[in-house]
Amino acid sequence: MVSIVEYTDCHFDGVEALWRDAFPNDTPWNAAHISIPEKLRHQPNLLLVAIEADQVVGSIMAGYDGHRGWISRIATLQSHRQKGIGEALIHEAERRLAGLGCIKINLQIVASNSTVLGFYRKCGYEVEERISMSKLLSKV
């Protein structure tokens, strides 16, 4: 039985291992030891983990800026994929965002990970015509 709960410090090692597995070519600033403390400073109730038998098997990070909701860092252990865990994480994040007044949620997919498009479409997300830009303010 999988349960979706808010992240606590006891989940750190599990989330760190999950992210290393799910995002092997990730940028340094997305590392768990950097991302998690920052998330805990802002809307910590939107960092969720999926737990099965005391093991972290999935995670999702969401946020709301008063205008849009965002979903990021969704991951499921490879051994636990195709079991509805990702969908459960998305639905719980959506429920929490809606409770804050959010009416639209965005997410971004790295082009090299386009195989997840089907998963997000199954969850009701659509591709929008957008150009994504970013600016790195400091080096990690």
Image (spheres, helix red, strand yellow):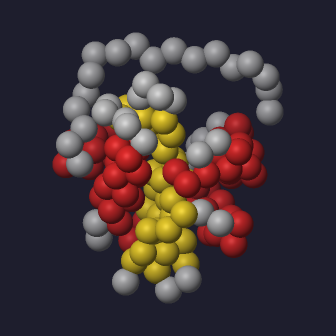
* Quadrant (top left/top right/bottom left/bottom right) for the N terminus: bottom left
Residue at image location 59% in from the left, 46% down from the top: 43
Coordinates of residue 93 in the picture (x, y in percent): 40, 51
Quarter of the figure with residue 2: bottom left
* Quadrant (top left/top right/bottom left/bottom right) for the C terminus: top right
- Looking at the picture, tell me which residue is in the foreground, 3 or 140: 3
In the displayed structure image, the side of residue 138 where residue 101 appears, left or right: left
Coordinates of residue 26 in the picture (x, y in percent): 60, 41
Residue at image location 48% in from the left, 36% down from the top: 64
Query: Is residue 72 shown to the viewer in this render?
Result: no
Residue at image location 37% in from the left, 36% down from the top: 102
Coordinates of residue 14 in the picture (x, y in percent): 62, 69
Residue at image location 37% in from the left, 57% down from the top: 92
Quarter of the figure with residue 55: bottom right
Marker count (numbered): 0
In the displayed structure image, the side of residue 36 where residue 101 appears, left or right: left
- Looking at the picture, tell me which residue is in the foreground, 33 or 117: 33
13 to 38, vertically: above or below: below
21 to 3, vertically: above or below: above
Quarter of the figure with residue 120: top left
Coordinates of residue 125 in the picture (x, y in percent): 25, 38
Query: Is residue 65 shown to the viewer in this render?
Result: yes
- Looking at the picture, tell me which residue is in the foreground, 28 or 90: 90
